[in-house]
Amino acid sequence: MRLRLAIALVAAGIGVALAAAPARAERLIVSVSNHRVTITPNYAGEELVLFGSVERDGDAFAPPSAYDLVVTVSGPPDDFVTRRKERAFGIWVNADSRQFLQVPSYLAIFANRPFDAITSPELQRSLKIGLDHIVLTQRVGTDYADVVASDPFRRAFIRLRTEHGLYRQNTAAVTFLTPTLFRTTIPLPAEVPVGDYDIDIKLLSRGAFVASTSTRFEVVKIGFEQFVANAARQRALFYGLTIVAMALTTGWLASVVFRRD
């Protein structure tokens, strides 16, 4: 009887130890080619390179098709308004509008293959994979919520941002150089917003979520433009008086130069 009890206690202890032991898992190691993008007067756009690897616990080998990656780059949040125009009495007028609240000013979603081939629609919604599943909070009457992907205002907002290169989606942008090494490029257009950018990387395997990690970079202005922007924001009164003085001086100089005697 005592022997059976001892064996049971040992088995229970082994079970607890196995349950407490860390499970075999993958983790992501990533980096970006430039963590600080500077905007100068002649800035015309730039491309960053995100690269990384999948590190596995143990010596198990991952087949070449075992992994999928979804990379989401999100720029500083801001408020926007999308308006719908109608023709009335021969002219176009604003008929309705929708306000988008604190949504990404820049949004890019990249993957190594189509989302439907990576995972199920349910997991796509849960993990917010793809532009159709990204939350874009809107003011709808007195409510604040996202709407269905087919909503005309939501579709128009994404279309307008896409035309300016500020929203994009590419399911062939992530390349696996080896079964565990990957890279992708992040294009930044000439009118890229200034601020902090978050990069979220999700790793999936055979339709299941495996791991995630994140990194970030910032876009800043330098030079005279940034000095003017900082002065307008931090010393508004001094900036306003300076602008008025410059306008008066310019007007006086113009009157002197073009004065007719």
Image: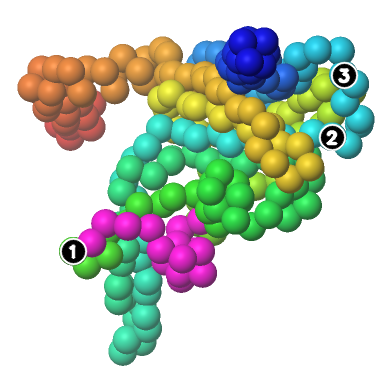
Residue 197, position in %: x, y?
Answer: 48, 26
Q: Residue at x 55, y 23 (%)?
A: 214
Query: Is disc 1 surrounded by few (<14), some (14 to 19) or many (20+) residues within 10 Å?
Result: few
| Residue 94 vs residue 30, the one in the foreground | 30
Q: Residue at x 84, y 29 (%)?
A: 176
Q: Name the amino acid, label 3.
A: Ala
Q: How has the structure been colored for display?
A: rainbow
| Residue 181 vs residue 238, the one in the foreground | 181
Lateral position of residue 31 relative to residue 248, left or right: right
Mark 1 or mark 3: name the one nearer the start of the chain: 3
Mark-to-mark CA distance, 3 and 2: 12 Å
Find numbered disc 1 in the image and state the secondary structure of the residue it sits on: loop
Quadrant in the picture for the C terminus: top left
Residue 205: image quadrant is top right
Q: Label 2, on which residue?
A: 66
Mark 3 or mark 2: name the one nearer the start of the chain: 3
Residue 138, position in %: x, y?
Answer: 32, 57
Q: Nearer the viewer, mark 1 or mark 3?
A: 3
Q: Which residues are magenta?
A: 143-158
What numbered label is drawn on residue 4?
none
Outermost bottom residue: 89
Q: Residue at x 63, y 33 (%)?
A: 202
**Res. 91 visible in picture:** yes
Q: Residue at x 37, y 74 (%)?
A: 85
What numbered label is drawn on residue 60?
3
The verdict on residue 105 being magenta is: no
Q: Name the amino acid, label 1.
A: Thr
Lateral position of residue 253 relative to residue 162, left or right: left
